[in-house]
Image: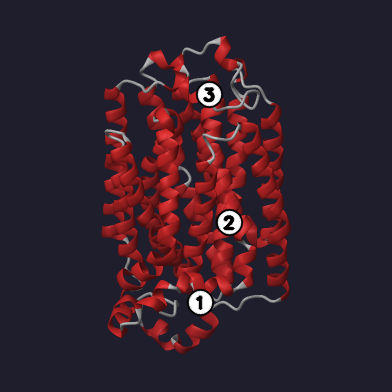
Amino acid sequence: MISRNFKNVLVVSIGFLSLFTAYGGLQSLQSSLNAEQGMGVASLSVIYASIIISSMFLPPIMIKNLGCKWTIVAGMACYVSYSFGNLYPGWYTLIPTSVILGLGGSPLWSAKCTYLTISGNTQAAKEGKRGSDVINLYFGIFFFIFQSSAVWGNLMSSLIFGQDTNIADISDEQLQTCGAADCGLNVSSNSTTIRPAQKLVWTLVGSYIGVGVLAMLIVAVFLDNIDRDQASQFRGNREPFCHTFLATFRLLKDWRLLTLIPLTMYSGFEQSFLSGEYTKNYVTCALGIHYVGFVMMCFGASNSLCSFLFGRLARYTGRAALFFLAALANFSCIIALLFWRPHPDQLGVFFVFPALWGMSDAIWQTQTNALYGVLFPRDKEAAFANYRMWESLGFVIAFAYSTFICLEYKLYILIAVLMLTAVTYPIVEYHEHKNPTPPIEEGSYQSHKETIQTHNNIICQTEM
């Protein structure tokens, strides 16, 4: 029999898998599908700008009042609204639903990270293991399942859009503008970004809405409400609003969090580059929009498998070695993309880059999330809210300059942020190695030892 904590990790993972099958597919297509006046990229920029705003105050308030479970359900509903906005895409539909998604995005991810951290610490206390090891394992399992959403969401888009044969005509003149050879700002006006038949768009978006609603039902029905008592206690204590509102910012007084900002922002830069720039300037430009799904499937499959693998390897290799591997892979890909001139005859090469990028992203996601959980065990909600805020700032900056800066300079910016990360992250890792942060269960579980032994209910360690 699997433990209740492990069951909950599976439920959260499957719920996110279903939800991001829809959103991930839409995000990969925005720069190509809604290319007119940069509307698709603009909507993505608005999403992450809204996430920054929501990160400032919503996660601690929602998690402490609703609990992790119902915060996740509410956040999922915000994501589904964006799918509805894509039924009839326009400035008056995409932008408002982008704002709604962004406001729900930070509470959703903060609640998920808090839930997995609580579950990991709880299970570690029961089994007498280190909390960081179980947290690493749980995040690895989550991202193994979650990242496969890129496979299914993009498979749906490629199979459906592939029925329109008019989107595959690539001229030799157009091929000369693909990659970093030209400025990379003219792709939005060429023939390959013409929207597929409206009927096919409705079919795809309708399917995405369906799997998004399914995600909400899975979590609402099957996920245990492990911090219900703490949420009720918080509502009863009537803690001053300003205290909860400022929780995200108070944590910025910790120098470790400030030093991790480049690492966190790089996560946003590298993800936005693959979904916004690589798909448009390499794949759509040289192969056609119907290939975006297949290429992103390769990214998702690599990301999923490596997330599971590195979640288990971390206890043997440590975080630093994995981060070094991710940085080396990304750096090599960026240099290669600067010189590669994409051509349909090099079909296999189009899949090599997302495969390596997926391996790197698996490390950035699993290890950075786990690192935040280990460094800030008593301020999980605020810590993960900061994580989403700074990662989203990376997304916003990257999407904001997407239509104004040539592709070559975007790659240089990516290298610069990566180099800054390589300087700042080791400082935090070295300090943690010399002065390990004590896991919260060492203090809280001793006072609740009898409760854990006499009850099967899961106890939340977060000090509300």
Q: Which mark is residue 264?
A: 2
User: What x and y, as percent, mark residue 140?
Assistant: 53, 55
Image mark for residue 180: none
Distance, label 3 to label 1, CA atoms, is 49 Å
Q: Amino acid at mark 1?
A: Arg
Q: Is residue 15 above or below residue 132?
A: above
Which residue: 60% across, 79% down?
438
Q: Look at label 3 and name its amino acid.
A: Asn
Q: Secondary structure at mark 3?
A: loop
Residue 253: name its quadrant: bottom right
Which residue is under mark 3?
186
Mark 2: amino acid: Thr
Between marks 1 and 2 in the image, the one whose residue lies nearer the viewer: 2
- Most foreground residue, 384 or 44: 44
Residue 195 on image: x %, y %: 37, 23
Q: Nearer the viewer, residue 333 or 215?
A: 333
Q: Earlier in the sequence, mark 3 or mark 1?
A: 3
* Foreground label between 2 and 3: 3
Disc 1 crowd rating (10 Å Cα; few below 14, some 14-19, many 20+) is some
Asked if labels 1 and 3 touch by Cβ distance under 8 angstroms, the answer is no
* Circle 3 Cα neighbour tier, 10 Å, few/some/many (<14 / 14–19 / ≥20): some
Find the distance from the CA under tag 2 to the CA under tag 3: 31 Å
Q: CA distance from mark 1 to mark 2?
A: 20 Å
Which residue occupies the extreme top position in the image?
172
| In the foreground, 6 or 355 | 355
Q: Earlier in the sequence, mark 2 or mark 3?
A: 3
Location of the N terminus by quadrant is: bottom left
Q: Going by the image, does 87 lie left or right of 116?
A: left
| First in sequence: mark 1 vs mark 2 | 2
* Residue behind mark 1: 378
